């Protein structure tokens, strides 16, 4: 049988249902590839990204020019434009992430558990690919190599729909990836599918027979739209309302560095801090210098009544109830002075999005209470919330971040793209013998 063409699949010439069927068939072929074959193809794709740098930058310049016009017209935020922009350094990072995914342990075919049910009757729990994963994302072109690398490494097919604001860059990256894989005919072309229109998104969300998981990466509105319009399981983080809590036992130098990094280092992303909580016992020592440093970088401060009273001449905007529930994705930070660790925990669990929250403290008991009682996917002590990332966790890359508690939580890497199956190896056993008492189960755990 001849291999399918590696030419880009245009959704306009074929229904999304047909593309999903072809992706399902492709996923079964990818799942059979050896880990060496998958890794070799990934390394080739990484090289192709580096070689195609000029092509990627030209496409991105086209998208960014349109983005500048959209922002000037009030149709795009500065945060969205920041996520859209690609640089030489960003391209090098893309290639590096693909190579790091190739270097990771094969997530497929791992024995997770083994149980002897009886003599010569052994049950094995083994990891396997999900199958077909649909990802809908906004603005971030660097998502493309992350998705394609993680999908191929984990033996899955991936159907992608990027935001229209990044259309040229996304298409260039997908084309480069496909061209790199032309020399690997064992990798089906239909294991990587790029959709193009909003209508395609609705069609994709209806493909519950051939798509196993949908991952929306983007705004709260996008995630809610996907969840409300699909019968396919959806894994999405919703919002990134992250907190830094400066405890009364905090090292002030650490608190300043961590708060600044969590807010300023890259404010447009979901793991940036949006609210700073400060224990009343340290607020007078900590907040004047912290606020001054933030304002030097152009951060707008929105403060509670106690913050306003403490810093009356710092041009601080009074915080409203809405601020505690807002993901700014910009150089805006809300500040609240709290009376206790317990009040900080209560505030985070009430207003946060269960993404990532950090405590700055030298008190190990306070840190343990915070990390045990804050109900978030990531809880940190003395570290910036910006560490909540698949690459920084050592996953090579991430396909998304989940605030939920089922299947995967936090940054989602290779393991999040696998499920498991049970394999039972017997020797003619039948249930009737156990029902009658003729034979007994041993249920012995095996190494």
Image (cartoon, grey):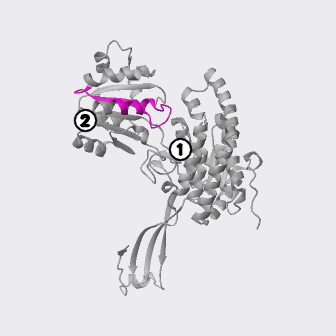
Q: Based on the displayed image, in which of its 4 quarters is residue 212 positioned?
A: bottom right
**Chain part drawn in magenta:** 256-282
Badge 2 is on which residue?
341
Q: Is residue 397 left or right of residue 162?
A: left
Q: Residue at x 22, y 27 (%)?
A: 281
Which secondary structure, mark 1?
A: helix
Residue 268 position within the rendered picture, expressed as x and y whole percent measured from the top left: 50, 32
Residue drawn at x 43%, y 80% as measured from the top left: 121
Q: In x, y percent, where is residue 295?
A: 41, 20
Q: Is residue 163 above or below residue 130?
A: above
Which of the two labelled residues, at mark 2 and mark 1, occupies the earlier sequence position?
1
Q: Quadrant of the C terminus?
A: bottom left
Q: Residue 243 or 260: which is nearer the viewer?
A: 260
Q: Is residue 39 above or below residue 197?
A: below
- The x and y percentages for residue 253 are 31, 30
- The residue labelled by disc 1 is 227
């Amino acid at each position: 049988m001849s291999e399918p063409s590696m030419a880009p699949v245009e959704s306009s010439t074929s229904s999304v249902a047909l593309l999903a069927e072809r992706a399902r068939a492709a996923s079964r072929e990818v799942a059979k590839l050896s880990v060496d074959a998958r890794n070799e193809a990934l390394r080739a794709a990484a090289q192709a990204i580096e070689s195609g740098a000029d092509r990627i930058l030209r496409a991105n310049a086209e998208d960014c020019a349109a983005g500048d016009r959209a922002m000037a017209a009030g149709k795009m935020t500065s945060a969205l434009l920041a996520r859209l922009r690609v640089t030489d350094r960003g391209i090098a990072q893309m290639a590096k992430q693909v190579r790091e995914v190739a270097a990771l342990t094969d997530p497929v075919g791992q024995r997770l558990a083994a149980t002897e049910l009886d003599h010569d009757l052994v049950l094995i729990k083994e990891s396997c690919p999900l199958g077909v994963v649909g990802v809908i994302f906004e603005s971030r072109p660097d998502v493309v190599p992350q998705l394609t690398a993680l999908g191929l490494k984990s033996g899955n097919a991936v159907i992608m729909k990027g935001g229209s604001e990044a259309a040229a860059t996304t298409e260039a990256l997908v084309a480069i990836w496909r061209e790199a894989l032309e020399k690997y005919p064992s990798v089906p072309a239909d294991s990587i599918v790029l959709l193009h229109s909003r209508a395609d998104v609705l069609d994709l969300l209806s493909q519950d027979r051939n798509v196993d998981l949908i991952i929306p990466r983007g705004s709260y509105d996008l995630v809610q739209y996907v969840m409300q319009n699909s019968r396919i399981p959806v894994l999405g983080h919703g919002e990134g309302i992250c907190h830094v809590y400066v405890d009364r036992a905090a090292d002030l130098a650490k608190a300043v560095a961590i708060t600044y990094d969590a807010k300023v280092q890259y404010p447009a992303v979901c793991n940036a801090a949006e609210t700073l909580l400060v224990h009343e016992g340290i607020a007078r020592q900590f907040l004047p210098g912290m606020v001054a440093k933030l304002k030097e970088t152009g951060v707008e401060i929105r403060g509670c009544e106690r913050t306003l009273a403490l810093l009356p001449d710092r041009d601080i905007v009074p915080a409203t109830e809405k601020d505690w529930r807002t993901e700014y994705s910009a150089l805006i930070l809300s500040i609240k002075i709290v009376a206790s660790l317990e009040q900080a925990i209560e505030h985070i669990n009430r207003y946060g999005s269960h993404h990532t929250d950090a405590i700055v403290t030298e008190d190990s008991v306070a840190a343990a209470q915070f990390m045990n009682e804050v109900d978030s996917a990531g809880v940190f002590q003395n570290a910036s919330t910006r560490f909540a990332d698949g690459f920084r966790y050592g996953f090579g890359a991430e396909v998304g971040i989940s605030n939920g508690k089922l299947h995967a939580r936090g940054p989602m890497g290779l393991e999040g793209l696998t499920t498991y199956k049970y394999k039972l190896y017997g020797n003619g056993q039948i249930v009737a013998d156990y029902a009658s008492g003729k034979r007994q189960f041993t249920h012995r755990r095996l190494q």
